[in-house]
Image: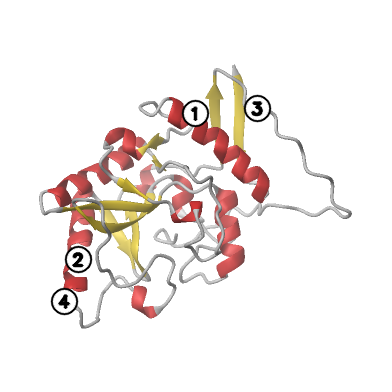
């Protein structure tokens, strides 16, 4: 059996290749946890009616470029994924549903987000705290959709780092306020709390029962195809943060 490592020290190109390996294994066996230490599952293997549009697999994010493969699945700890499914089922009884914008996030990807944003009100500094709880597999970014999967009016778009994205909506649009309260109610009932500066960000309440994920080890029956290494640059440099920080638990 071959072993593949999704490491926190990978550069951008290597990150995409490693995540592609993880993606291949997940798609091949969607109902099985894709790792043994720790377990991560494809959320849609629990409930395939949950909409998924990972924004870091495209250009509609703060970096303006894709950080994941285009068909990256939404991965979470199994018990957290079940809670997400519970929230989605509650919303379906009200004619709505969940759409996931981000779930488990490799640390190398989060380091790239930090390099772009450099604002700890919105992105957790990976060198000064627990880091992002997305990298633990216990946080999601989500929005509300109709029963047919169409997005509805919400306070802002994803990754809009402005006061309008605050958890408490103070705008004049009653429809937006209703949608946000419904989303927050569903997530709270399922065992999540929100983040002050981002209405779309939710963390499982018992996150302290989990452990950080420094790397994801994937066990495969078949080796991944070899990828040619790029030419060596003229000068060498480090490509990956090494800090093991401690920050506010709600930070993304």
Query: If you read the primary sequence from the N terminus, does the residue marked by circle 2 or circle 3 appear first?
Result: 2
**Relative to residue 82, is residue 94 depicted above or below?**
below
Instruction: Residue 120: give x, y in percent of width and height.
Output: 51, 69
Pointer 3 residue: 225
Quick one: 14 or 166, which is closer to the camera?
Answer: 14
Query: If you read the primary sequence from the N terminus, does the residue marked by circle 1 or circle 2 appear first?
Result: 1
Pointer 4 residue: 174
Of all residues, the one furthest to the right in this rendering is 234
What element does badge 2 sit on? helix
Quadrant into which the C terminus falls: bottom left
**Relative to residue 94, is residue 40 depicted above or below?**
above
- Of marks 3 and 4, the one in the foreground: 3
Residue 204 at least partly seen: no
Disc 2 crowd rating (10 Å Cα; few below 14, some 14-19, many 20+) is some
Instruction: Residue 118: give x, y in percent of width and height.
Output: 57, 70
Query: If you read the primary sequence from the N terminus, does the residue marked by circle 4 or circle 2 appear first?
Result: 4
Q: Are marks 4 and 2 in contact (CB under 8 Å)?
A: no
User: Taking 126 as reference, is 226 left or right?
Assistant: right
Pointer 2 residue: 179
Q: Which residue is drawn at 59% across and 66% down?
A: 116
Q: Which residue is drawn at 68% across and 52% down?
A: 240
Q: Spatial distance from mark 1 to mark 2, Cα to Cα? A: 36 Å
């Amino acid at each position: 059996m071959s072993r593949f490592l999704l490491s926190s020290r990978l550069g951008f190109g290597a990150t995409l290749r490693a995540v592609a390996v993880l993606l291949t294994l997940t798609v091949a066996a969607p109902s099985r946890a894709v790792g043994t230490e720790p377990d991560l599952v494809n959320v849609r293997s629990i409930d395939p009616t949950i909409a998924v549009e990972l924004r870091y697999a495209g250009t509609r994010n703060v970096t303006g470029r894709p950080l994941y493969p285009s068909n990256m699945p939404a991965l979470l700890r199994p018990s957290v994924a079940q809670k997400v499914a519970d929230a989605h089922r509650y919303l379906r009884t009200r004619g709505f549903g969940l759409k996931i914008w981000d779930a488990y996030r490799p640390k190398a990807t989060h380091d790239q987000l930090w390099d772009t944003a450099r604002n700890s009100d919105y992105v957790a500094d990976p060198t000064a705290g627990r880091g992002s709880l997305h990298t633990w597999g216990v946080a999601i970014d989500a929005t509300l959709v109709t029963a047919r999967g169409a997005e509805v009016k919400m306070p802002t778009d994803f990754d809009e780092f402005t006061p309008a994205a605050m958890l408490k909506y103070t705008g004049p649009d009653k429809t937006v306020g209703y949608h946000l309260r419904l989303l927050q109610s569903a997530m709270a009932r399922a065992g999540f709390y929100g983040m002050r500066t981002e209405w779309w960000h939710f963390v499982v309440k018992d996150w302290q029962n989990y452990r950080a994920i420094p790397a994801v080890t994937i066990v495969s029956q078949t080796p991944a195809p070899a990828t040619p290494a790029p030419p060596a640059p003229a000068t060498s440099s480090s490509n990956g943060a090494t800090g093991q920080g401690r920050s506010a638990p709600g930070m993304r």
